Amino acid sequence: MPGERPEHVPVMPREVFQVLSPSEGEVYADATAGLGGHASEIAVALGSSGTIVLNDLDEAHLGKAEDRVRTACERRGVACPRIVKVHGSFAALPMRLREQELVVDMLLADLGFASDQVDDADRGFSFSREGPLDMRYDRGAGVDAGTLVNELSEEELASILFEFGEERASRRIARRIVEERRSEPIETTSQLAAIVRRAIGSSPSRIDPATRTFQALRIAVNDELASLRSLLGSIAAQARGSAGSPWLAGGARVAIISFHSLEDRQVKHAFRDLSDLGVGQMLTRGAAKASETEIEGNRRSRSARLRAIHLSDPARPETGVGQGVR
């Protein structure tokens, strides 16, 4: 229909389906359900005896993801799996699964943010759209980006920009932010972006000078790296058999899509450690990347990196699963 927004496109759907290798009756947990792009692809393979767990920190996404899953099943003429919705950080997902006595065969965490979050100026994620400095995935909790920008010390701001944005001009930007906020509060995305651009000056880089600053603040606001570290720790504890009651099945497949080096580094090291311990087998050689064809149709897939691992099943030590992605 005229004026209707295009459907959200999931990143690397073919590769995700390949490494997770879903089968009828299995349990799939989407740790970052978003708008249901990946979940809708998996759902059609699970059938009515399967279960899909939709988890998201943005509560508004859960209903949208469920609708997309049900629509996908209807279009393909297959029975829809049972759908369980969980609102919260993926760091808490293992605990929530245990509470509901769910043990999952497949886990996916797509660490990017959904297109509707970027497109909504009121969310404050994009420096290309005028909006308040919010950046929270869960708008009902936590401290927003505006509070950090206007209340943190110059040293604290510089630390966030350097650690989470890998911004080499972090001190210069932090100093300029503190100078500018003495005159008036920095309340909008365009204000902050303009301040960063003035602090850095002209650059031959193809990316906007404000990119790393916005990335760093978003990560800090949502405590993203700590949440990822917690999830990876829970996966490792389960794989090593030191996690108490199970939330991952023996032989579970785990896939994580990251979009910048800070995330990918954590995933790489965690999966490599499990492989070295002999409790997991890598399903990707290094990090799989989107094809040139996908990048042409979906520019946000350009920086995506997919890593996947097949955890050992003590009951069936010789059994493999699916095919890896190279």
Image (cartoon, helix red, strand yellow):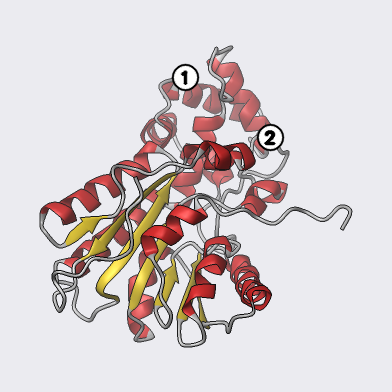
Residue located beneath label 2 in the image = 128
Most foreground residue, 279 or 22: 22
For the N terminus, the quadrant is bottom right
The secondary structure type at the circle numbered 1 is helix
Dot 1 amino acid type? Arg
Number of marks drawn: 2
Give x and y (percent) for residue 134. Answer: 60, 48
Element at badge 2?
Answer: loop
In the picture, the disc for residue 19 is none
Q: Is residue 92 left or right of residue 110?
A: left
Q: Quadrant of the C terminus?
A: top left
**Residue depicted at x 62% and y 29%:** 193
Q: Residue furthest left?
A: 277
Q: Which residue is mark 1?
A: 172
Relative to 252, say whether 116 is above or below: above
Q: Residues within 10 Å of mark 1 (few under 14, many from 20)?
A: some
Q: Amino acid at mark 2?
A: Ser
In the image, residue 238 above or below residue 8: below
